[in-house]
Amino acid sequence: MSEHYSSFDRAGTLWLLQRITAAFLIVVLAFHFFLLHFVSHASEITFAQSQWRMQDLGYYSLMVLFLITATFHGVNGVYNAIVNQGLTGTPLRAVKWLLVAASALLIVQGIRTANAMAGIPLY
Amino acid sequence: MSQSYNRGLVEDFGRWTEFSAGMWAWIFHKFTGWVLVGYLFTHIAVLSTATVGPETYTATIQGLESLFIVRVLEVGLLAVAVFHILNGTRLLLIDLGIGLDSQDTSFYASLVLTGVIAVASVPTFLAGVF
């Protein structure tokens, strides 16, 4: 078996990523709520307004990054909660891969949705 | 030098009468986290109507927003998000060694501020539903 020379502790990397995504999400989630409930009002949202926002490359990129970081932070949080409940071995591995698959589906579907709003024909 | 201690099984919710502020903070953070991740999947599912067509998207969003229960749930979602943000900020600062001696106070402050923001947002969230 080959040696693993990296000094990275994988558990430590996930721990750090959970905190980095947290710092990002604190700002972007607050911005998202403020923009779509207090600046604009959710009840007045139309496709044209969503399209207008999503056609801005900066906004589109921020929303895609928001989707990816929120998915990671949320699903990794669920995984940690399940570990805290004491699940181990094969059941834990099964849950892990189920969560990975759910995350991948959510990110793909979220990007398809963003593309549909932005008028990008990849959806 | 690091120290460890036996915190007992926090996951045993039958012990709730013995829980300290720190345990409540842990439970509320987990609960609000579960709600937010559940909402994330629901949110993308609803927004996915944009892939069907502009009219379907607009009709879906405006149809949901016309329901009183949806507006009430949105206030609940705001409260959950605000608490998770405030308590999460508190946790990040504690990870950095800031505010170690005032953890109970900062947790109570997070709860009070969440309540104030949620109540203050009610007029905005319920506007036009009646």
Image (spheres, coloured by chain):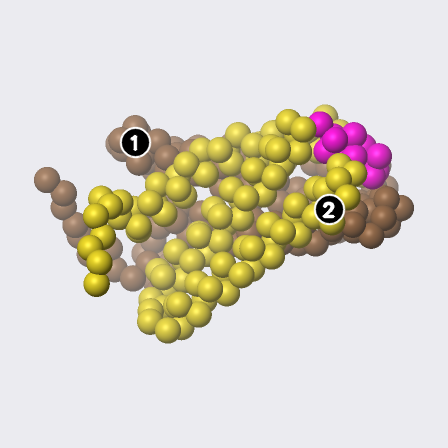
Residue A115 appears in the figure: yes
Q: Which residue is mark 1?
A: B96
Instruction: Pinpoint residue B110: horizontal percent, then vertical percent.
Output: 46, 35
Chain seen in brown = B
Q: Is residue A99 left or right of residue A54?
A: left
Q: Secondary structure at mark 1?
A: loop
Q: Which residue is mark 2?
A: A122
User: Can you name the residue that lies furthest to the front here?
Assistant: A2
Instruction: Pinpoint residue A40: horizontal percent, then vertical percent.
Output: 75, 29
Chain seen in yellow = A
User: Does B77 lie within the magenta span?
Assistant: no
Which residue is at a point 35% across and 60% down the rendered structure image?
A84
Mark 2 vs mark 1, foreground winner is: 2
Q: Secondary structure at mark 2?
A: loop
- The residue nearer to you, when weighing A103 against B68, is A103
Please state the extent of the stretch shown in magenta in the rendering: A46-56
Which quadrant of the figure has residue A44?
top right
Indicate the quadrant containing the N terminus of chain B: top left, top right, bottom left or bottom right. top left
Which three-letter amino acid code belongs to the residue tagged 2?
Answer: Leu
Indicate the quadrant containing the C terminus of chain B: top left, top right, bottom left or bottom right. top right
* Chain letter for the residue marked with disc 1 in the picture: B
Which three-letter amino acid code belongs to the residue tagged 1?
Answer: Leu
